[in-house]
Image (tube, helix red, strand yellow):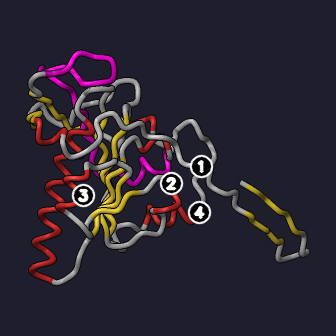
C-alpha cells in the first residue's frame, strides 16, 4: 500500500505525517501485545528525543533510499519523497527498486509519503500509489522558524481532499469528492518531530550493469542505466 499527501510549503503535510506516526505506533503496540511481533516504522523524519524514548524499538531513521529498498514487514513514513524519486529523472528506476515497489503488498510494506505536487514524483512510483490527498491550511498560527518572532500558541485547521490519480490530470488535478476531512493543528503534533528539519536527497543510486546477448548469433551488448 502506498499513500501520498501533497501540498505546498506549510500546508500541514508533515504534521499529518506526525499524526500518522502516532496512529501507527499505537496500532503496532497493540499488535505486539496481541500477536507477539514488533512492526517498525522507518522514516526520514527526525523525531524528538521524547517521542523516540517513548517508542524504543518501534522507530528506525534512514537518510538514504538504499537503506529502505528491500525492507519487509514495516511502515515507511517518507517525507518529500520526490527528493529521492524525482519526476525530473526520465530513465526508469533500477529494476531492484521497481521490483520492490511492485511487490510491496506481498512483503507487508506500507508507504506513506509527502510531496508538494503528485507529479513531482517519479512515474514508476506514482503508478503504484493507491490513494493521494491534497492538504491545505485553512487558518491558524504561523510557522515557527529561525530569526522569527516566537509563536505564543500553536493552533489551526487543515483540510484534506482525495485526488483522482487513475487517470491523473497534471494541469488540473480533480477531487474525488466534495466531502473533505480535517487535521487539527495542535502543539502536541509539533513536539513529535523537528519542525525545522531539511530533507536532503539521497546519493545517486548505482548504475545497472546489464549484459544483453543475442541467442541467435551470440552478439553481446553492454548497457549501463
Residue wearing tag 1: 203
Instruction: Find out whether the residues at labels 2 and 1 contact each other: C-beta distance under 8 Å.
Output: yes
Residue wearing tag 4: 95
Which stretch appears magenta?
A: 122-151
Instruction: Find out whether the residues at labels 2 and 3 contact each other: C-beta distance under 8 Å.
Output: no
Using the image as rendered, state which of residue 89 and residue 32 is in the foreground. Answer: 32
Residue wearing tag 2: 64
Which mark is on residue 52? 3
Using the image as rendered, state which of residue 103 and residue 108 is in the foreground. Answer: 108
Describe the element under mark 2 as helix, strand or loop. Answer: loop
Q: CA distance from mark 4 to mark 1?
A: 17 Å
Q: CA distance from mark 2 to mark 3?
A: 20 Å
Q: CA distance from mark 2 to mark 1?
A: 7 Å
Q: Earlier in the sequence, mark 2 or mark 1?
A: 2
- Residue 80 screen position, x and y as percent: 40, 40
Neighbor class of circle 1 (other Cα within 10 Å; few <14, some 14-19, many 20+) is: few
Q: Earlier in the sequence, mark 4 or mark 1?
A: 4
Q: Residue at x 14, y 30 (%)?
A: 158
Q: Nearer the viewer, mark 4 or mark 1?
A: 1
In the figure, is residue 15 to the left or right of 94?
A: left
Residue 170 lies in what quarter of the image? top left
Amino acid at each position: 500500500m502506498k499513500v501520498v499527501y501533497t501540498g505546498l510549503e506549510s500546508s500541514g503535510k508533515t504534521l499529518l505525517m506526525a499524526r500518522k506516526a502516532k496512529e501507527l505506533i499505537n496500532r503496532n503496540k497493540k499488535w505486539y501485545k496481541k500477536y507477539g511481533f514488533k512492526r517498525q516504522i522507518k522514516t526520514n523524519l527526525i523525531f524528538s528525543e521524547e517521542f523516540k524514548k517513548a517508542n524504543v524499538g518501534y522507530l528506525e531513521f534512514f537518510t538514504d533510499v538504499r537503506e529502505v529498498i528491500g525492507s519487509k514487514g514495516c511502515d515507511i513514513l517518507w517525507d518529500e519523497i520526490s527528493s529521492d524519486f524525482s519526476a525530473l529523472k526520465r530513465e526508469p528506476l533500477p529494476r531492484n527498486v521497481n521490483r520492490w515497489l511492485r511487490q510491496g503488498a506481498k512483503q507487508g510494506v506500507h508507504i506513506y509519503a509527502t510531496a508538494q505536487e503528485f507529479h513531482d514524483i517519479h512515474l514508476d512510483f506514482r503508478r503504484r500509489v493507491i490513494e493521494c490527498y491534497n492538504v491545505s491550511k485553512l487558518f491558524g498560527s504561523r510557522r515557527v522558524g529561525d530569526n522569527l518572532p516566537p509563536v505564543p500558541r500553536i493552533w489551526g485547521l487543515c483540510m484534506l481532499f482525495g485526488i483522482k490519480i487513475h487517470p491523473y490530470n497534471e494541469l488540473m488535478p480533480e477531487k474525488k469528492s466534495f466531502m473533505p476531512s480535517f487535521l487539527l493543528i495542535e502543539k502536541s503534533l509539533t513536539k513529535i518531530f523537528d519542525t525545522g528539519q531539511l530533507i536532503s536527497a539521497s546519493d545517486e543510486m548505482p548504475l545497472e550493469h546489464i549484459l544483453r546477448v543475442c541467442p541467435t548469433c551470440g552478439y553481446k551488448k553492454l548497457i549501463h542505466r
